[in-house]
Image (cartoon, grey):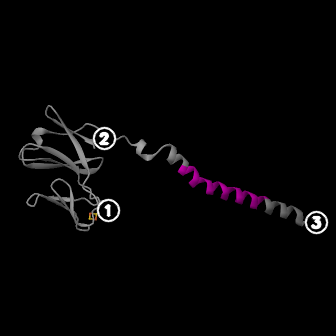
């Protein structure tokens, strides 16, 4: 006769544990649904017409490195005055690449990828070129946008 209340309590405890476990298994499913409805790409606005430098900051045949969203971006001015910008993040596993002006190439010291002056991957494991930015000139400002 005294075992009845103990069984009831144990049953109630197990029911609560099972309900909690059920709720925990729902969390990943809810996360997937939320990610589908509000994708991460929509949460962060893409960069558009960001004034990264003045034309006078980067003379002909030179380059300068800037931080953009905490990531390095190189802005290059050719001998003919053509300005281009690209990310210095290696497309293999995300190391920072180094520009070697004497070779006119980018080298990644992590796994040996090499990119030409235009950012095209020419050696090593990097699968695609460095990320380019669209460059617009307005007056003396160099504006960059995500391509
Ligand atoms: S991260 Fe650059 S080659 Fe691997």
The image quadrant that residue 21 belongs to is bottom right
Image position of 120 with respect to 47: above or below: below
Magenta-tinted stretch? 12-32
- For ligand 1, the image quadrant comes to bottom left
> So how many labels did they put on this image?
3
Which residue lies at the image location 71% right of the left edge and 59% below the top edge?
18
C-alpha gap between disc 1 and disc 3 = 68 Å
Name the disc covering residue 93, or none: 1
Outermost residue, right side: 1
Q: What residue sits right under mark 2 in the picture? A: 47
Q: What residue sits right under mark 3 in the picture? A: 1
C-alpha gap between disc 2 and disc 3 = 73 Å
* Quadrant in the picture for the N terminus: bottom right
Would you say 20 lies left or right of 32 here?
Answer: right
Q: Position of residue 142 (x, y in %)?
A: 18, 38
Q: Is residue 28 magenta?
A: yes
């Amino acid at each position: 006769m005294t075992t009845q209340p103990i069984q009831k309590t144990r049953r109630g405890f197990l029911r609560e544990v099972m309900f909690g476990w059920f709720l925990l298994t729902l969390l990943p499913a809810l996360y997937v649904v939320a990610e589908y409805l509000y994708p991460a790409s929509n949460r962060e606005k893409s960069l558009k017409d960001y004034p990264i430098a003045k034309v006078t900051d980067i003379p002909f045949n030179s380059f300068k490195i800037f931080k953009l969203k905490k990531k390095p971006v190189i802005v290059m001015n050719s001998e003919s005055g053509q300005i281009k910008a690209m990310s210095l993040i290696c497309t293999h596993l995300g190391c920072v690449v180094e520009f070697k002006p004497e070779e006119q190439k980018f080298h990644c010291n992590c796994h040996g990828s090499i990119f030409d002056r235009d950012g095209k991957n020419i050696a090593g494991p990097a699968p695609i070129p460095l990320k380019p930015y669209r460059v617009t000139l307005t007056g003396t400002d160099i504006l960059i946008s995500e391509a």
